Amino acid sequence: MVTATEVQTLEFRIVRQVKTTPPLTFTVEITYDPEDKGYLVECVELDVATWSDTWDEVVENLLDAVWGVSEVLVHDHQTDPTLRDPRLPHARLVVSLDGEETLRKLLGL
């Protein structure tokens, strides 16, 4: 007798465009892996990804990671203006926000 098990993966993609000049797009991809029993979430434009067992924790981890990477990118560019990084416009916008709640809204979380 052969039995089959079905594995389902839950995936979300949130795409938000910010009306800046030029317009900036933020894409958040969220995947639940039932085998690993956890969530992988990524902010594509900033090349940031985190993992956690729960939805709430993975969202908080992403917000912290996006904020941290953005601060480092902006700081590095201020230290050396010749540095070129395609993530810099996104990072500048993130560090200009009021805080985590505003970032959460911006990313659609």
Image (cartoon, rainbow, N blue to C red):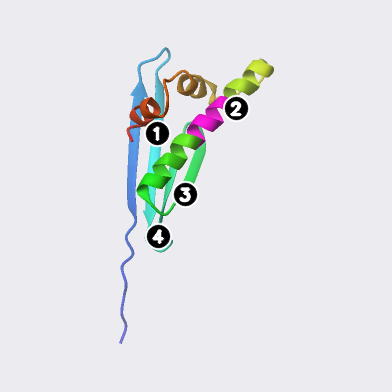
- Magenta part mainly helix, strand or loop? helix
| Residue type marked 4 | Lys
Query: Residue 72: which numbered mark, if any?
Result: 2
Percent x, y of residue 72: 60, 27
Name the N-terminal-most of marks 1 and 4.
Answer: 1
Query: Residue 37: which numbered mark, if any?
Result: 4
Crowd around label 3: few <14 · some 14–19 · many ≥20 (10 Å): some
Name the N-terminal-most of marks 1 and 2.
Answer: 1
| Residue type marked 2 | Val
Q: Quadrant of residue 102?
A: top left
Q: CA distance from mark 1 to mark 2?
A: 20 Å
Name the N-terminal-most of marks 3 and 1.
Answer: 1
Read off the magenta span. 65-72
Residue denoted by label 3? 51
Crowd around label 4: few <14 · some 14–19 · many ≥20 (10 Å): few
> Which residue is located at x 30 percent, y 87 percent?
1
Crowd around label 1: few <14 · some 14–19 · many ≥20 (10 Å): some
> Which residue is located at x 55 percent, y 31 percent?
69
Magenta stretch contains residue 107: no
| Residue type marked 1 | Thr
- CB of mark 3 within 8 Å of CB of mark 2? no
Q: CA distance from mark 4 to mark 3?
A: 10 Å
Side of 47 where 78 appears, left or right: right
